[in-house]
Amino acid sequence: MINAIKSLSTIEKGLLLSILIVAIPALFINLGLRVFYEDEGIRGLVALEMMLSGNYITPTLNDTFYYSKPPLYNWILILFFKCFGGISEWTLRIPTIIFLSIYTWFIVYINEKFLGIRQALLVGLAFLTCGRILFWDSMLGYIDMSYSLVSYAMIMLFYVKWKYPKYEVTAFIASAFLLAIGYMLKGFPSFLFYGFGVVSIMILDRSLSILKSKWLYISMLIPLMIIGGYYWVYSHYNDASNTLSPLLDQSTRRTIVRYDVLSMVKHIFTYPFENIYHFFPWTFMVIALLRKDLLQLIRAHAFVTFCVVSFLLNIIVYWVSPEVYPRYILMLVPLLFTVTTYAFYKAPSMPKRIIQLFFKVLICVAPLIIFALTVKFWYALDAGLIMASMICGIVGCILIWIYFKKKNTLLLLLVLSLLLVRVVFNITIIPDRHSRDFAKVAKADALRIAESYPESTFTLYGNSKLDYTSSLYISKERMIQNTRSEEWQGVEYLIVDTVRTQFPDCKYNIIDSFKIRELKKTMIIVECES
């Protein structure tokens, strides 16, 4: 790929270098500012409880067995916590940035081999700067970036199996290993991706020959040994059969299995438009697919054909499943971008001009957005941040000038413009949202409780629900795990959720209370009299 990059023009190399430089502040500024968000609390708390208990095999959540995800991502988080000196919003989110960087590089690496460096860069950078990634998923410490990287790599290995028979054995072994890794990250969905990979080859070959390959079955020993070995060790601590039903529930919770036909029909009609919105602006290139000879165009390129088949096979599960989140399909988005990018480069002049005009407008609008944000939040910025924001706006204006001098750099200029907007977004909107977020109040309350009772044992009473972010803050500050009990005897302090359960049937004193983000509830701390 280095040789391919050398073939770029001097201006293209300069813009690519600028993209790499601007991506650093775009991805890192205020990364750790906002309070842990929803699933981040779960990921962090499970990892913390593993560290506190010394049991890295059976995950727990508020002292209750946690069955919804296998433990691999928690192990990754623990590694980062130990390498970066503790648990914080920043250390929990850093793995997302690292996996996103690797994922983007891998997308470029794969596509360069079959589409050339310019199209490959567009596919990878479009993924990096689409709305969902740039303004949401790159900011959060969720499991999905690592899982999507593994799943996308597994899908690509099926192309290797299809087109390069001499690498068949290696591809089978590698994809089976990634299947095991994917399962240990997120459970059963990995089997669907693997299964659809097999089906894609059957469709492309119009043959069942892949089912006759001995390596298909021999390679399955790898996930069998890895997954089976984990559950064998797990069974020494807890009944491993207890994990299967919750994992299956997680895999089907938002699918057609749980919803009525009307919800499914509504979702089928709205889902494509939702994704055009979430992965905007690069989804605008679907216009390039509106052509009479689309099938011939796709069939003319084997890699594009494979991406189309793989995308359609995998997306149908989400297309008929109401209430699926965009992050669930991050492994499929590069497949779509590969196809739309290829179609864009092959598009007739009229649709190509429409797309280019739209992207040109975005480049011109970007500095206006930057200056507007700077003015709006002027009162909240110090002199240094105002200067940084203004520089981003000025650079955005320079990019417009570059476009009119070098129109063939349009796509790289758009990527750079989007990254500049993200930098200013970090400086202005993220602090503003943080200042108005009730979670900030809940965090402060949790830290106050941790400081007030540094060595006390807190026990969740009955079915009391302490939200995971507050529990994480209390536990990490004291490095003491919260426990759970149906009894009050012999317990130092009980945490009671009066929305879900009653106070214990004993004489007690209410000694403190604190707010949590979930439903903005108040949790009560009580001390029972012997």
Image: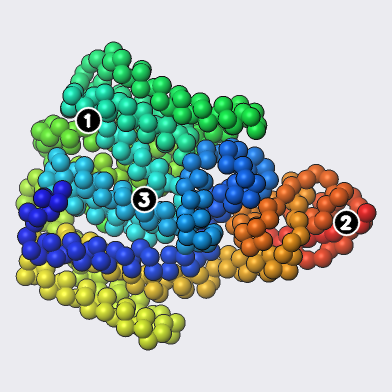
SS for dot 2: strand
What residue is shown with label 2?
528
Counting from the top left corner in percent of width and height, residue 412 is at: 17, 60
Q: Looking at the image, do the residues carrying marks 1 and 3 touch, with CB atoms under 8 Å apart? A: no
Nearer the observer: mark 2 or 3; the answer is 3
10 Å crowding of disc 1: few (<14), some (14-19), many (20+): some
Q: Is residue 264 above or below residue 223?
A: below
What residue is shown with label 1?
160
In the image: residue 278, left or right of residue 85: left
SS for dot 3: helix
- Three-letter amino acid code of the residue under disc 2: Cys
10 Å crowding of disc 3: few (<14), some (14-19), many (20+): many
- Three-letter amino acid code of the residue under disc 1: Val
Of 62 and 427, nearer the camera is 62
At 87% from the left edge and 48% from the top edge, which residue is drawn?
A: 489
What residue is shown with label 3?
99
Q: Quadrant of residue 496?
A: bottom right
Q: Give the CA distance from mark 2 to mark 3.
A: 48 Å
SS for dot 1: helix
At 36% from the left edge and 83% from the top edge, which residue is drawn?
A: 384
10 Å crowding of disc 2: few (<14), some (14-19), many (20+): some
Name which of mark 2 and mark 3 comes first in the sequence. 3
At 30% from the left edge and 45% from the top edge, which residue is drawn?
A: 333
- Three-letter amino acid code of the residue under disc 3: Phe
In the image: residue 8, left or right of residue 200: left
Residue 51 got which mark?
Answer: none
Name which of mark 1 and mark 3 comes first in the sequence. 3
Of 434 and 174, nearer the camera is 174
At 14% from the left edge and 58% from the top edge, which residue is drawn?
A: 356
In the image: residue 11, left or right of residue 467: left
Q: Is residue 442 visible?
A: no
Q: Give the CA distance from mark 1 to mark 3.
A: 23 Å
